[in-house]
Image (cartoon, rainbow, N blue to C red):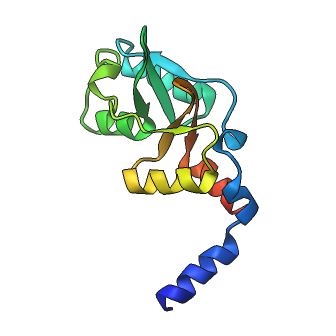
Amino acid sequence: MSAVEHDQMAEDLLDATAARQPIHTIMGTGLATVEQHDSVRDAARELTSNDIGAVLVSSPVGPVGILSERDIVAVVALGFDLEAEQVKTLMSVDLITAAATDPIADVGKLMVQSGVRHVAVRDGSKVIGVVSMRDILDALLA
């Protein structure tokens, strides 16, 4: 299959209307957070209880990072003590964000370019939610 045929097939599969919708329309309600001094086990419980793949790490000044289930799996594989290990040692501090009004397709491209699976959604300077790559794919391929 040529590159042109591949691109045309991808366009045929995508919901063009959804691609232009603002990202906040597919964002979950509520904002799951943990503190940077919480244990990794506490973060895992937060992920499980909310059935999500990443949690924002908060501080008095706002979000300082994000912790994903993949980060936790790495710690488990290395045999670390999940009670003793703090979130701050594992979290990603390069928080990738998108404006609530950014189109879904643009946020998907941002994820690919940044190599991340979760993006914080902000309204002005305030983080109001998180979207995952799965959220974007569900919207675009619905």
Q: Where does the image place residue 64, in percent across and percent down from the top left? A: 38, 22
> What residue lies at 47% left-to-right and 47% top-to-bottom?
117
Q: Is residue 81 visible?
A: no
Q: Give 91 or 79, whichever is nearer the viewer.
A: 91
Q: Please state the total of marks drawn on the protein image.
A: 0
Q: Residue at x 55, y 44 (%)?
A: 132
Residue lying at the far front in this picture: please name it: 124
Q: Residue at x 25, y 32 (%)?
A: 79
Q: Quadrant of the C terminus?
A: bottom right
Quick one: 92 or 78, which is closer to the camera? 92
Residue 82: image quadrant is: top left
Q: Is residue 49 above or below residue 114?
A: above
**104 to 12, vertically: above or below:** above
* Residue 61 visible (yes or no): yes
Find the residue positioned furthest to the top.
60
**Residue located 51% across and 20% down the image:** 33
Picture coordinates of residue 128 (x, y %)? Answer: 60, 26
Task: Give x and y (percent) for residue 77.
Answer: 29, 39
Closest to the observer: 118 or 22? 22
Residue 37 placement (x, y as % from top left) = 35, 12
Q: From what the image shows, is residue 86 above or below residue 10?
A: above
Q: Is residue 111 above or below residue 76?
A: below
Q: Quadrant of residue 20?
A: bottom right
